[in-house]
Image (cartoon, helix red, strand yellow):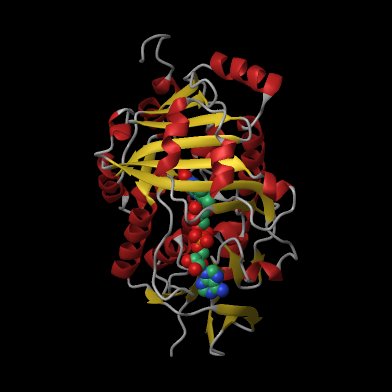
Amino acid sequence: MSHPDVLVVGGGIGGLGVAFSLTRQGQTVRLLESAPAFGEVGAGIQLAPNCTRILDDYGLLDEAKSLGVVPDAMVMRDAVDGSELTRLDLRHLEQRYGYPYLVIHRSDLHGLLLRACERAGVELVNDAKVTSYENTEDGARVTLSSGETQQAGVVIAADGLHSVARKLFVDDQPVSSAYVAYRGTVPAEQPRVRSVDLSEVVVYIGPRCHFVHYGLRGGEMLNQVAVFESPKALAGQDDWGTPDELDAAFAGTCDFVRDGLPFMWRDKWWRMFDRDPVMTWVHGRIALLGDSAHPPLQYIAQGAVMAIEDGWVLGEHVARHRAGDGAVDWTAALAAYEAVRPEHCRRVLTTSRKWGELWHLDGLAREQRNVLLRARDTYDYSFTDWLYGPTALTPDQEPEMFTPVPLDSAQPVPAGGVA
Ligand code: FAD
């Protein structure tokens, strides 16, 4: 078997994204996925403008929009009394950052990237579980569980939270948050779906729990996520996050939230882990990408977005460090990638943890939080500029395509001017 320029390990959103990005830059890419078939579990995923600007550059945004929903608003409510705390006007936000906020079914996003990889000529290989990595004189090599070895000029490890490659960099373990997520979808014909505004992404935040809903597939279904702290996890029990804990965790929430619980899938749940940030992602010709480098808690909805950003940034630096004959200076490209991404992702990881703490407050602290959130101006973007702007991609310079909409043209509309 001939050697490709690049081996990507992992066919999740991160692996497919980087495989497409590097193929676009003229690299031959082979992607190794341990599962017997490509796919994603779970329901919806939120893609902020810092991701949709990349999908647009890839020529995939129109298809993504046709598969998903471009909501009008993101609304935060108190889970106990149901009252509104604050909101983002997502149409105004689109003007500010130049690209939409999109919600899409995970399998639709994954399928979109998979088809783009197929069209671009990525060699996609299933049943290929990588068990070890090593650098070689002129690249890197992986060994599969079958004993077979494969090598390339560079290996990108997009192998997720339980990354094997990460052990080359740091001897750490996933950090349990003791929180667990239940997911589920409600079909359009259910009265519950008619009772909500499908143009809104809504999060109800409450003591040690929160509940998210938004429309998917052009409003064909309502996606719901219920997240709570597990007392059994805190007590050190192994069987934590069970459905009885789900019902108990939301017992004190408002009717709308509790009425959503019967629609959650009760046969599977997702325990929430992240890892402490690491700033070294490149080891010779082996690089981490996506959750293998920076698995976050999901509270600011940036895990898959960061993975897609990683792939785009690496592709741009490959383009900048490619000679006329097509040869890539991988040492320079990987160094530039590592100079750009870890600090931004460190900030996302630590902010996600703090954001979760804020959401889950109880007692007086909850009331104080609510006062502050209610006082926030809908058009105050000081909390999102660092995240949704282009700085995560090129902090040192801003290519023309990422020049944000001038702030003057995106001034807050007068108070009361927007519903
Ligand atoms: P993964 O999706 O874990 O993919 C890794 C792939 O590698 C898998 O296909 C796996 O089979 C394969 N693999 C693993 N080991 C090997 C091996 N040894 N050899 C070969 N293949 C291997 N992010 C957002 O941006 N927006 C959201 O709204 C959002 N919501 C979320 C809600 C919840 C409840 C959760 C849990 C997460 C959410 N995320 C969100 C985070 C997002 O899902 C992840 O960050 C993202 O999917 C990570 O993608 P990845 O490709 O890096 O890793």
Residue drawn at the location 73% of the way across and 64% of the way down: 170
In the image, taking residue 184 as reference, residue 238 lies left or right, namely right
* Image location (x, y in percent) of residue 329: 55, 70
Q: Residue 291's spot in the image, x, y percent?
A: 57, 58
Please say whether residue 218 is visible from this viewpoint.
yes
Q: The C terminus appears in which quarter of the rendering?
A: top left
Q: Is residue 334 above or below residue 260?
A: below
Answer with the quarter of the image where residue 248 lies. top right
Relative vertical location of residue 392 with respect to residue 330 in this rendering, above or below: above
Quadrant of the drawing holding the N terminus: bottom left
Image location of residue 105, percent across then percent down? 36, 50
Q: Count the marks.
A: 0
Which residue is located at x 42 percent, y 41 percent? Answer: 262
Toward the front, the furthest residue is: 244
Position above or below: 328 against 295: below
Q: Is residue 334 left or right of residue 108?
A: right
Q: Is residue 391 visible?
A: no
The part of the image, by quadrant, that contains residue 117 is bottom left
Whole-percent x and y of residue 374?
Answer: 54, 16
Q: In which quadrant of the rendered view does residue 70 lie?
A: top left
The foreground one among 238 and 411 is 238
Residue at 39% in and 68% down: 38
Name the one closer to the observer, 193 or 395. Answer: 193
